[in-house]
Every structure is written in C-alpha cells, then in structure tokens.
Amino acid sequence: MVLPLVETEFKIFNAEGLKGAFYPKTKPVLNDSDWFSGDYQKKAEEYLTDTVGFRNVLIRLNNQIDYSLYEKLHAYDIVVGKENSLQPTTHFDAYLGKLIIPHVAFDTMSYKLARLQDTLNKLNKFLFFIIAPSKGSYDIGRAPYWYNTKKEGRSFYEEIVENFDKRKVNYMDFNTIFLDRKKWSERKGYTDYGVHWARHNVAWAFDTILRYIESRSSYTDLPKIENVNYFEIDTALPMDVDLTSSLNLMFPYEFKHKFYDCSFGVKKTNKNKLSLMIISDSYYGLFNSVGMADHTFESYSYWYYFKTVYKKNDPNPYQANSLDLKAEIDKTNVIFILATFTNLDRPGWGFIDQAYSIYFP
C-alpha cells in the first residue's frame, strides 16, 4: 500500500503513459464554495485516482491478463477477430446498417452537391466525392464468432450511393474497387491490425484517382504513377498497425502475417499544373504522409475534417474558419471530398453547406 504513495510523490520509475483518448484530470484548487458543495472532494478523488503511482502499470497488467487468457481487449471499438486480427466494431455496424441514418439529410446533401459540381464545372473546376473503402465490409468474414453479422437496415453507404446515382453526382466507390481487387490480389487491402487501407496500396489508389479525374473532367494528361514495386518489410509501418496503439498491453501485440510497402515513380507532364483541394477524414492521411499530392499537383490544401488546413510547402497549419472559402475555391482546379463508411453520415463536415451558400445565397 505504501509503494504507490511513494511512487506518486517521487516518480522513481516514471512509467510510460497510457495511449488513446484520455482526458487527464487537473489538480483542483481549494476554495470555500467547492469545499462546502462537495465539488472539491469529487475533483480531488478523480485527480488522485488518475495520478496514483503504478496506476498505468497495473492497468497494462490487467489488460494483458484479460487478453492473454480470454482475448478480451479494454480499448474502445476494438475486438479480437478471427485469425488473431483486430477489428473495429463501429465499421461493422456502419456496414450492416446498425447506425441511425438521417434519411432527409442524404437527399438534401446530394442535391446541393450536384448543383455545386455543375456550377463549378462551368468555372472549369472539377468537384467529386470519394467513398473510401471500409474494413467493415472488407473484413466482415473475420468478425468475432460472437458478433452478429446479420444485416439490420440500410447503411450510410447504401443511402449515399442511391442519392448520388439519382442526382448524378460525380463519385468514386473505393469500397467496390477494393472488394473486387480482393478477389485476385495477393496483397491485402487492409492489414490485420489497421483500420486504414494498407500503405502498399497508396500508389495504386492515388493513380486510380488521377485516372478518374482524367476520364470525367477537362483535365487530361495528368501525371502518372509508374514503376510501382511491392516488397516485403520486416517492421510494420505505424499506419498499418494503428489499431494496436491504444491497446495498452504489457507486451507488444503479436503480428502473424507479412507486411508490404511499395516504391514508385511519377511521370510528370507540363500540360497541366493544377491545384488540388482535399476535404477528408484520416483516410487521406496515408496519401499525405507519402506526399502524393506533392508529387502530382502544383499546389494543394488538405482540409482535415474541414477544421485544420495543411498547404503545400507551408509548415503552418490553418484553422478552416480563418480562411476565405470562396477565395480558396477560386484558386483551385480540382476538389474532392473523401470519407469512409463511419463518416458518411456527415459528408464534407460542413464544406458542402458552406460552399452551397456561397454560390446559391
């Protein structure tokens, strides 16, 4: 009983902190009102619970015992699937239609998006939507034995595809592309331990996007990704095992399959020096980390969840609400919105409504 108190006071071992979404408690300030209302005591208890010595070590030990004996994980949305894979249950839920859908919103959103793309097309700008693949549909066959894989209703994906087709919205469906590729490719679209598409897909996927732009817009002769070479690697890349980062086990999670990476070249042209705007969730992060837009576009801006904006050759991020959206669109040639299944209930995160109000006040 004394040892945790000693560690709390002197921090002798300085154990590694826990990973994941945590909100550390701050030490409360004593005052009369909080003392007599009982708020101080409650805040002090929460603070001491979070900062007591060896707490992180004991949590990791408890997590390790539960995983080793029962394959039970103490991490939000992550379970052990078949073949020792890690699976995010919300992605299964989104695929199986277990999440609540605002039906009217999809029709309104697709109507606005269709009008926007037509107006921007007249201004020689190409706007389209990319449905990212989903581990929920790709790996549904490896869900845990106890998880109910029966389809319960219409999914965000089904709603959005139906409305896009009805309104003739420009869109790419990487979900269908990945499921088709799964039938013949020896390399998986997802690793067993990641929630995003595997890194070795990055060159092929981005080249597919470039070819789509060429086929649907006035912009032709775009750069081409060529000489793609796949090779096995010994150490997993962080994005390929991102589901393991918040497990908080005593020992590293054991990987039981091969990992791949790729190298590639870019055949550039002088015909089109274009600017690109990306509004996306974390699924674009892999493209960004490899610098795909750097290689293929003269300039670009990456609007992460339409909140934080990253620009080419600019180390400073911007807040989206601090920028003039009309001015940013005016200097852009190609715009795409990218989202995976679990984010299709709020496509564009406000971009579509704001852009619509600019061109259709």
Image: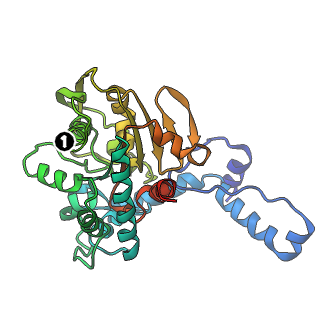
Residue at far front of view: 122
Residue at far bottom of view: 152
Does residue 96 appear left or right of residue 61 in this picture?
left
Does residue 305 appear left or right of residue 198 in this picture?
right
| Residue 309 point in image, percent of width and height | 52, 41
Q: How many marks?
A: 1
Residue at far left of view: 184
Q: Amino acid at mark 1?
A: Ser
| Residue 189 point in image, percent of width and height | 21, 47
Q: Is residue 139 visible?
A: no
Of the pair 237 and 213, the residue shown nearer to us: 213
Of the pair 175 and 237, the residue shown nearer to us: 175
Quadrant of residue 23 within the rendered picture: bottom right
Residue at figure coordinates x 35%, y 64% from the top left? 110
Disc 1 crowd rating (10 Å Cα; few below 14, some 14-19, many 20+) is few
Q: Is residue 267 visible?
A: yes
On screen, 73 above or below 325? Answer: below
Residue marked by disc 1: 215
Residue at figure coordinates x 36%, y 60% from the top left? 67
Residue at figure coordinates x 33%, y 46% from the top left? 121
Residue at far right of view: 32
Query: Which of the image's four quarters has the N terminus?
Result: bottom right
**Mark 1 element type:** helix
| Residue 126 point in image, percent of width and height | 33, 44
Quadrant of residue 237 within the rendered picture: top left
| Residue 302 point in image, percent of width and height | 45, 40
On screen, 77 above or below 220? Answer: below
Residue at figure coordinates x 34%, y 40% from the top left? 124
Of the pair 250 and 3, the residue shown nearer to us: 250
Q: How are the residues colored?
A: rainbow
